[in-house]
Image: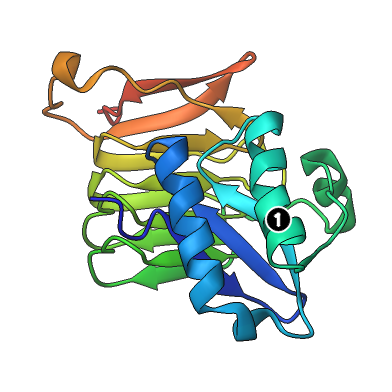
Amino acid sequence: MNQDLVVFKGTQDGVYIYIKDGSFNSIKKELDKKLKKSISFFEGGQIIDFKGRRLSEDEKSELRRIIKDKYKIKISEEVKEEDNFEKEEIFKGIGEGMTKFIKTTLRSGQFIHYKGNVVIFGDLNPGSVVEAWGNIIVLGTLRGIAHAGSNGNKEAIVAAFHLQPTQLRIANFIARCPDEENVDESKWPEIAKIEGEEVVIDTYLPKK
């Protein structure tokens, strides 16, 4: 049940730790277990940040203690989300910009990050993560984690035939997902966007 709650993703700058939805105690146990088995993976490197499941500052502190105190792995200084937005120009091509097409369903444990728009010909299953600087369009059911406008563009959207995300974010705004029991599957495609200071989800009905 608790497999793959924690996934390591290496980049040229260091390692990101992707945390998936689950009990925090299970996340801690799995992180400890995976660090013990993969300690050589971190030699000479550092952990950059946590991504995926939103963690409180207390939860982040607990995980950092395991990483730094128990396994002596270096963690880079935490960078606030707003600072990340300033480092690279906010992606403006949500109307006509670079787009990555993925012609398959994404399974649990798969992670996609793209500096543009992402279109998926399939489903986004629980445990999978898509992070895009632009829009995210899923030609199927979105049940995983989707973060559009991830480097700061609040005009980005997330759209799918059926929106049932584990977590949905646009820029630094997070949508509140309804309880599963109360979710009725829409007969029409759905679109999530920022209105005011919150993410709203509407039925997409093209104008005649």
Residue 65 position within the rendered picture, expressed as x and y whole percent measured from the top left = 72, 49
- Residue in the image at 56% along x and 66% along y: 114
Does residue 94 show up?
no
Residue 168 versus residue 159: which sits nearer the camera? 168
Q: Quadrant of residue 190?
A: top left
- Decide if residue 165 is on the left or right side of residue 15: left
Look at 27% across and 49% down and name the residue there. Answer: 126
Closer to us: 27 or 157: 27
User: What residue is at 63 percent from the left and 13 percent from the top?
Assistant: 196
Viewer-side residue, 95 vs 192: 192
145 in relation to 75, above or below: above
Residue 155 visible at all? yes
Residue 107: image quadrant is bottom left
Indicate the quadrant where residue 111 lies: bottom left
Quadrant occupied by the C terminus? top left
**In the rendered image, the vertical position of residue 188 relative to residue 75, given as above or below:** above
Query: Which residue occupies the foreground of this view, 13 or 118?
Result: 13
Residue type at numbered disc 1: Asp
Report the label total. 1
Q: Position of residue 84 (x, y in %)?
A: 81, 50
Q: Residue 204 appears at what percent x and percent y? A: 29, 29
Residue at image coords 28%, 64%: 106
Q: Is residue 127 left or right of residue 115?
A: left
Colour approach in the figure = rainbow
Q: Position of residue 148 (x, y in %)?
A: 54, 45
On screen, residue 145 versus residue 125, left or right, reads right
Label 1 neighbour load within 10 Å: few <14, some 14-19, many 20+: some
Secondary structure category for the residue under label 1: strand
Residue occupied by mark 1: 49
